[in-house]
Image (tube, grey):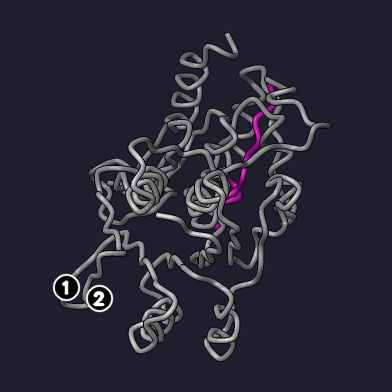
């Protein structure tokens, strides 16, 4: 199927945008002109050569914004925005719309069309996106390549003993303890404090490791092929929501804790998990 001018409307999170860039990049490599709608991915424009970004259109401007496209993809996250966009297309059949559903229920979601794709919860989101766009394009192979390329002045894992750390909100003291343990093991902890997405990507890309909570940046670290330890507040994180590029190590609260809370993952467990991550890292060894 030939698609010439495609718009991809991503969910709000940066991680969702990175995953939907798999579809954008596949379409681009197949010869389509692609605009990816996301409110922050433009901060990584220098990392996505040849890609075009735009802010997500409001519902009021949606009709005007999409008029030049012959096909659109919507990443459905259950938000009021996603529901409003889907509702608009249910009343306006042109251009064709594909909805990518991480989870689908016939009781709460619009009826499926041949263009829609429902994800397999046993696969990470990025794998599902790759499979979905390959299916729509009727291609046998699928690729998780989203076109993310670092600026030429950066060197992958240049500081291989540096550990980039993203402190979790509300548990700063725990991450201070983690940093002390990382330093005691002979590594150089560095907290990511800037909200600048490109700067955060640069720090992670040149670091040897990344430690942080379930967040946009743990997906970015996976995308950048940086060994990552995710300190999860979720006892049983679904495969669907895990970073899907370089496999990450997950540390979850112990089963006897009644509440799902990150505070109860004690520092010795995190230290041990980090040591195991390093031991499995053949690049470092």
Residue 203 position in % (x across, y down): 73, 38
Residue 132 position in % (x across, y down): 35, 51
Q: Which residue reaches farthest front?
A: 2
Q: Nearer the viewer, residue 256 or 125?
A: 125
Q: Quadrant of the image for the C terminus?
A: top right
SS at circle 1: loop
Q: Which residue is mark 2?
A: 109
Q: Give the residue displayed 44% in from the left and 42% down from the top.
A: 243
Q: Which residues are magenta?
A: 161-174
Q: Give the residue displayed 49% in from the left and 54% down from the top.
A: 20
Q: Give the residue displayed 71% in from the left and 45% down from the top.
A: 49
Label 1 near label 2: C-beta < 8 Å?
A: yes
Whole-angstrom CA distance, mark 2 to mark 1, is: 6 Å
Residue 189 position in % (x across, y down): 69, 31
Q: Which residue is mark 1?
A: 106
Q: Toward which corner of the image does residue 155 lie, by quadrant?
A: top right
Above or below residue 165? Residue 154 is above
The reply, left or right, for residue 81 in relation to residue 216 is: left
Q: Nearer the viewer, residue 127 or 161?
A: 127
SS at circle 2: loop
The reply, left or right, for residue 127 in relation to residue 63 is: left
Above or below residue 132? Residue 231 is above
């Amino acid at each position: 199927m030939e698609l010439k001018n495609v718009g991809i409307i991503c969910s709000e999170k940066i991680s969702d945008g990175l995953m939907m860039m798999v579809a954008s990049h596949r379409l681009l490599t197949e010869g389509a002109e692609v605009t990816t709608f996301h409110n922050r991915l433009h901060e990584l424009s220098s990392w996505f050569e040849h890609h075009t970004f735009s802010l997500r259109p409001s519902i009021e401007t949606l009709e005007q914004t999409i008029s030049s496209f012959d096909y659109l993809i919507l990443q459905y996250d259950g938000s009021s925005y996603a529901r409003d966009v889907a509702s608009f297309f249910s009343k306006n059949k042109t251009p064709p719309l594909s909805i990518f559903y991480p989870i689908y229920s016939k009781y709460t979601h619009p009826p499926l069309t041949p263009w829609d794709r429902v994800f397999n919860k046993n696969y990470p989101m990025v794998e599902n996106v790759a499979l979905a766009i390959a299916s729509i394009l009727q291609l046998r192979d699928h690729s998780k390549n989203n076109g993310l390329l670092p600026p030429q002045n950066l060197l992958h894992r240049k500081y291989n003993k540096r550990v980039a750390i993203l402190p979790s909100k509300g548990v700063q003291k725990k991450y201070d303890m983690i940093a002390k343990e990382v330093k005691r093991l002979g590594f150089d902890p560095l907290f990511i404090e800037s909200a600048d997405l490109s700067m955060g990507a640069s720090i992670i890309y040149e670091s040897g490791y990344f430690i942080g909570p379930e967040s946009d940046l743990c997906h970015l670290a996976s995308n950048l092929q940086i060994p990552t330890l995710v300190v999860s507040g979720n006892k049983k994180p679904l495969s669907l929501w895990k970073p899907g590029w370089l496999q990450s190590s997950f540390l979850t609260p112990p089963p006897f804790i009644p509440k799902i809370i990150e505070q109860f993952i004690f520092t010795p467990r995190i230290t041990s998990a980090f040591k195991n991550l390093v031991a499995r890292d053949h690049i470092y060894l």
